[in-house]
Amino acid sequence: MNMIEPEKITIIEGPPPVFENALETWALAITEGITVPHAMRCLVRTMNGATLVERCQNAWKEGRDVNLEYRDRDGFEEQALIVAVRAGAQDEGEVLHVWVRLDRPLPEIYLVFGDEDDEDDEGDSA
C-alpha cells in the first residue's frame, strides 16, 4: 500500500497560532467530513507567503493533504488540516491567512476580569 505523504507547513518560531472560529460559509462547507469538524482560521507571520501558498496549491493538485504543524502552549507538537490559505500583508509584515479543519474542539479559555471578591460584594449591596 502506497501512502501519499502530506505536505507540511511548519511554524518554527514564535507563539502558537491563535485559532478563531471560521464564520465564512464556504469554510464550513469544505470542512465537512465523517466527524463533526471545527472550521477555524488563524494568521501566521511569514517571510515567503506566496511560496507557501504555491506549495499548498501544488499538493492539492496532486491530491495530497496539507497540514499546519505547530507547538501548542505546552510545547507539544500539533497538526491541523489546512483547507484554504491566502497570502496577505499587515503593518508588521507578510502573513498567511490559514483556514483549518480541527477534528477536536479547542480547549475553552475562560477570562476573568477584575477580582472575584468584587462580584460577591456587588451582589450583597443590592
Image (spheres, helix red, strand yellow):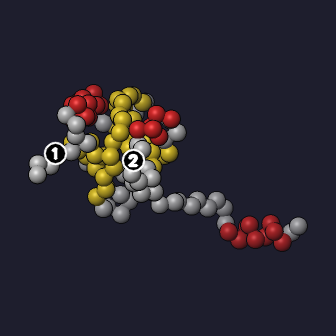
What amino acid does circle 2 point to?
Answer: Gly
In the visual, does 31 lie left or right of 57? right
Q: Residue at x 35, y 39 (%)?
A: 83
In the depicted structure, whether residue 90 falls above or below residue 106: above
CB of mark 2 within 8 Å of CB of mark 1? no
Position in image of residue 102 (x %, y %): 39, 51
Mark number displayed over residue 33? 2
Q: Residue 29: which quarter of the image?
A: top left
Q: Quick one: 108 or 94, which is closer to the camera?
A: 108
**The residue tagged with tag 2: helix, strand or loop?**
loop
> Where residue 38 sits in the image (x, y, percent)?
45, 49
Q: Is residue 9 visible?
A: no
Compared across the picture, whether 20 is left or right of 63 comes to right
Q: Which residue is mark 1?
A: 4
Residue 81 visible within the image: yes
Give above or below for 35 relative to 26.
Answer: below
- At horizontal 61% and vertical 61% (from top left) the residue drawn is 112
Viewer-nearest of labels 2 and 1?
Answer: 2
Query: Where does the C terminus fall, quadrant-wise?
Result: bottom right
Say the numbered circle drawn on residue 24. Answer: none
Residue at left offset 36%, top offset 35% = 84
